[in-house]
Image (tube, helix red, strand yellow):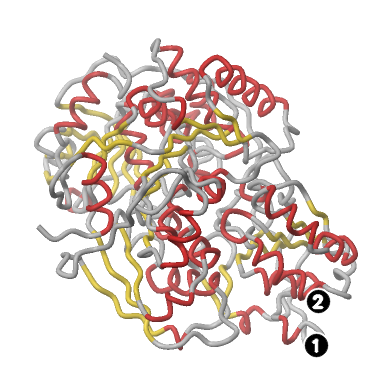
């Protein structure tokens, strides 16, 4: 049977001769990783269930969210991980190392055809070298550390063929932002994406990393590039593991194939709030900025630093503008020092920090305040993700040029004075709230459930809206519920009004974004009985299934005319959903055997 890249990798690691979309397999994991914010929860799960580590040689901690150790709770969590690592012979890539996904590639821990899981929702960045990477929640990672494998549902694959020649001013960041503009946040939801075309042969490893790093923002399981000879050589030089890259069979079956003409691509930026809401730089030209950020797993590589230095050399950051630069790894930082790039950054007036995730995480440089306008090379600009201001996403070239000019521009226009500078107003200021924790557990595990409906008619509700990153250091379930939806406009008081047994009904791509388990556990803390959505973020759905929280996918929920507060009945095995107020019924996707078994046990690690 002909197979795609992801099908071949999963088959190779599950000892199956063939796999097809929809198959559920247990697959072996070559690298099992926990970061600093999720690591303490992984340790807690292992200790709570009395579980051992299967293979310490394949198990790692990466401290990249808060490499400064500047937050008390992060520092405590990091120390918990260090102590556990000492007891179990686990390697720690500590606060001086950099971003974990990049380390996996550069240290040869992952290579073409390998598999890896991490508490990092951008672990699918490993598709850049033709490897399988997946961000997962704390329960999944704990299970992988204990068993050395984890269950996974083989996704449908789609093929994107890039045709034509890239214009000279188009960077790899522009490529992925243009693709996001074409496909949006959820049209590729749950698919494995393979990218082909003559133009891809010119993509360097850094280019591929930039593009693959935003698969999560597209809703995709992963963006995979067939490994080139250059990529294979790079990986063979760094790993001691013999490997053979895998490629899709010529007659592999794809759900869809898209032909995209890259010659039409333009330099673009994502407008605040939505990575897929792009606009040409020419449309945004002249928008005054307050700060810039260059770094993250998307644009923190050495080539990004070199491009940035070329623009900043012999120039100064505009008065009143703060430019923050964070290399992705210690190796990149050292190379910047050796090449004189750090001196260029400092001379230009930029703040340079030690390697790590920086602006994407709550604990390092890159955050902004109310009313602040930031242009960033990160991969996310969800409300509140990088602070309380507005964030535009763009390439390092555009960010560096904008920091010099003081407004959004390109390198070729940074010395011009726009005829009319456009001052953008601030975003809605997040309201800090503290409410007493509401805690309840889902003790009963019936096949048929009933509950009162919370109707939230929104698509693309991301994990920062569900459970904001400022609460990520919370590990106690009883404390999580009070913060549910406090960053979702119009539902900030959800936690105060929700009742045990309620059922949330919402739109497409619910739970997009981060791999944080708390975005599931906060509902369990409140006693929410189930979540019904038209579709779910890939990682979020797994996290909910593994936590025993019923998540039901229903594309026809509107046919039963639900109103807020209606009572519904859901048969988890048949998928039938009935509005008890009007008697109308429809059918959702029924639970798979795996999902129902985990649900009845009360969670992946229970029983």
Secondary element type, mark 2? helix
Q: Name which residue lies at 49% across and 72% down.
A: 203
Res 571 visible: no
Indicate left or right for 133 with 237 as reference: left
- Where, quadrant-wise, is the N terminus in this rendering? bottom left
Q: Position of residue 184 (x, y in %)?
A: 40, 66
Residue 29 falls left or right of residue 262: left
Query: Disc 1 designates what residue?
Result: 416
Residue 604 found in image quarter: top left
Relative placement, left or right, of 460 versus 468 is left
Instruction: Give the tally of numbered discs.
Output: 2
Q: Which mark is residue 405?
A: 2
Q: Residue at x 12, y 45 (%)?
A: 587
Query: Is 417 rendered above or below residue 564?
Result: below
**Lower sequence index among marks 1 and 2:** 2
Q: Locate residue 65, reporting x and y percent.
A: 62, 40
Q: Is residue 598 above or below residue 248?
A: above
Callout 1 secondary element = loop
* Mark seen at residue 48: none
Is disc 1 in contact with disc 2, using a CB cutoff of under 8 Å? yes
Please identify the quarter of the rendering in which residue 382 is found: bottom right
Residue plotted at (56% across, 43% down): 100
Category of crowding for the residue at label 1, using alpha-carbon neighbours closer than 10 angstroms: few (below 14), some (14–19), many (at least 20): few
């Amino acid at each position: 049977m002909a197979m795609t890249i992801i099908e071949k990798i999963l088959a190779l690691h599950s000892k199956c001769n063939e796999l097809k979309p929809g198959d559920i397999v247990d697959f072996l994991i070559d690298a099992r990783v926990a970061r600093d914010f999720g690591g303490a929860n992984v340790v807690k799960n292992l200790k709570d269930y009395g579980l051992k580590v299967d293979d310490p040689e394949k198990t790692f901690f990466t401290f990249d969210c808060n490499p400064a150790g500047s937050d008390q709770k992060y520092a405590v969590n990091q120390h918990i991980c260090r102590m556990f690592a000492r007891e179990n012979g686990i390697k720690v890539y500590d606060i001086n190392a950099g971003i974990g996904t990049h380390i996996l590639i550069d240290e040869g821990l992952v290579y073409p055809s390998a598999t890896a899981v991490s508490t990092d929702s951008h672990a699918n960045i490993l598709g850049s070298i033709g490897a399988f990477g997946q961000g997962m929640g704390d329960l999944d990672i704990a299970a992988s550390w204990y068993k050395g494998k984890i269950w996974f549902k083989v996704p449908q694959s789609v093929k994107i063929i890039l045709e034509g020649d890239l214009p000279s001013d188009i960077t790899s960041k522009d490529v992925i932002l243009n693709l996001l503009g074409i496909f949006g946040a959820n049209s590729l939801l749950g698919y494995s994406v393979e990218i082909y075309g003559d133009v891809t042969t010119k993509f360097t490893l850094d280019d591929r990393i930039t593009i693959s790093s935003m698969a999560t923002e597209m809703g995709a399981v992963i963006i995979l590039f067939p490994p080139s000879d250059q990529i294979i050589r790079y990986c063979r030089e760094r790993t001691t593991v013999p490997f053979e890259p895998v490629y899709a069979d010529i007659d592999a079956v794809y759900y869809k194939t898209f032909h995209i003409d890259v010659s039409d691509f333009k330099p673009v930026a994502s407008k605040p709030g939505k990575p897929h809401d792009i606009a040409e730089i020419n449309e945004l030209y002249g928008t005054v900025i307050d700060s810039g950020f260059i770094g993250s797993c998307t644009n923190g590589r050495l080539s990004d630093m070199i491009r940035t230095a070329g623009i900043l050399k012999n120039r100064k950051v505009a008065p009143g503008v703060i430019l923050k630069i964070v290399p992705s790894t210690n190796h990149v930082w050292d190379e910047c020092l050796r090449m004189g790039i750090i001196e260029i950054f400092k001379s230009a007036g930029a703040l340079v920090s030690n390697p790590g995730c920086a602006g994407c995480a709550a604990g390092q440089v890159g955050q902004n305040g109310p009313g602040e306008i930031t242009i960033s090379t990160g991969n996310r600009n969800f409300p509140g993700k990088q602070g309380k201001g507005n964030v535009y996403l763009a390439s390092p070239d555009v960010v560096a040029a904008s920091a010099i000019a003081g407004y959004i521009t390109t390198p070729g226009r940074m010395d011009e004075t726009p005829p009319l500078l456009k001052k953008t107003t601030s975003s809605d200021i997040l309201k800090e709230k503290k409410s007493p924790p509401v805690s309840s557990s889902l003790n009963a595990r019936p096949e048929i459930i009933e509950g009162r409906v919370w109707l939230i008619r929104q698509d693309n509700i991301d994990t920062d809206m569900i459970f904001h990153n400022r609460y990520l250091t919370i590990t106690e379930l009883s404390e999580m519920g009070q913060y549910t939806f406090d960053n979702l406009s119009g539902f900030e008081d959800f936690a105060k009004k929700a009742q045990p047994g309620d059922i949330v009904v919402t739109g497409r791509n619910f739970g997009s974004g981060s791999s944080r388990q708390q975005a599931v556990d906060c509902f369990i803390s409140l006693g929410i009985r189930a979540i019904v959505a038209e579709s779910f973020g890939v990682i979020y759905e797994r996290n909910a299934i593994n936590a025993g929280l019923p998540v039901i996918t229903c594309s026809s929920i509107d046919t039963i005319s639900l109103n807020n507060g209606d009572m519904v009945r859901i048969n988890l095995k048949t998928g039938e959903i009935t509005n008890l107020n009007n008697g109308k019924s429809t059918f959702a996707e029924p639970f798979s055997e795996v999902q129902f078994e985990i649900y009845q046990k009360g969670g992946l690690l229970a029983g």
